Amino acid sequence: MTQVEESVEVGVPVHTAYNQWTQFETFPEFMDGVRRVEQRTDTLTHWVTDVNGVHREFDAEITEQIPDERVAWTTVGGEARQSGVVTFHRLDDDHTKVMLQMVFEPEGLAETVGDRLGFVKRQTKGDLKRFKEFIEERGLETGGWRGVVV
């Protein structure tokens, strides 16, 4: 198992950053390698990814969701094994720290080598940077889900 932890400071209020993160179907707009995310229920998403020529489809279940604080997930079926949490930390009225912590299990030679070379860490850092650009350029979230999952 591999652990990744990255964070980014975004120039929007905590509720704006959180609301945008709950819009999973927009992830392909800022996450490299994510081709499609379908929100199937309040707690179930279906992912299609292509990372370095490796195609994966899997389902992820939201295991915890607290507005303006955290979203946690784990895969429940398909071709990937991972879990993680994104937390949102209010820095001031207009700035938020977004922290992503993820654990995953590389499969096959290509993923194992890519992981050892730091590919996943760099990709995660890039995805968070692109999230920052996405939300700061808009200034507003594309939507938001304020339900609680515990």
Image: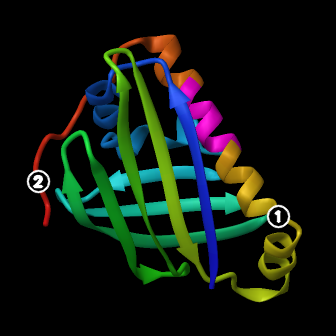
Residue 103 percent across, percent down from the top left: 55, 74
Residue 116 percent across, percent down from the top left: 84, 75
Q: Amino acid at mark 2?
A: Val
Q: Amino acid at mark 1?
A: Gly
Circle nearer the N terminus (1, 2) = 1
Task: List the residue tagged with mark 2.
Answer: 148
The total of numbered circles placed on residues is 2
Q: Nearer the viewer, residue 42 or 94?
A: 94
Q: Nearer the viewer, residue 103 or 34?
A: 103
* Residue 131 as seen in the image, left or right of residue 106: left
* Residue 40 as seen in the image, left or right of residue 115: left
Task: List the residue tagged with mark 1.
Answer: 118
Using a 10 Å C-alpha cutoff, classify the residue at mark 1 as few (fewer than 14 neighbours), some (14 to 19) or many (20 or more): few
Q: Nearer the viewer, residue 106 or 48?
A: 106
In magenta, the rendered stretch is 126-132
Q: Nearer the viewer, residue 114 or 97?
A: 97
Q: Residue at x 33, y 63 (%)?
A: 72
Does the magenta run of residues contain 53?
A: no
Say what secondary structure mark 1 lies in.
Answer: loop
Q: Residue at x 89, y 68 (%)?
A: 117
Q: Residue at x 59, y 40 (%)?
A: 128
Residue 13 percent across, percent down from the top left: 33, 21
Depicted 7 relative to depicted 15: above or below: below
Residue 14 percent across, percent down from the top left: 31, 29
Q: Residue at x 31, y 25 (%)?
A: 16
Using a 10 Å C-alpha cutoff, classify the residue at mark 2 as few (fewer than 14 neighbours), some (14 to 19) or many (20 or more): few
Query: Residue 65: which quarter of the image?
Result: bottom left
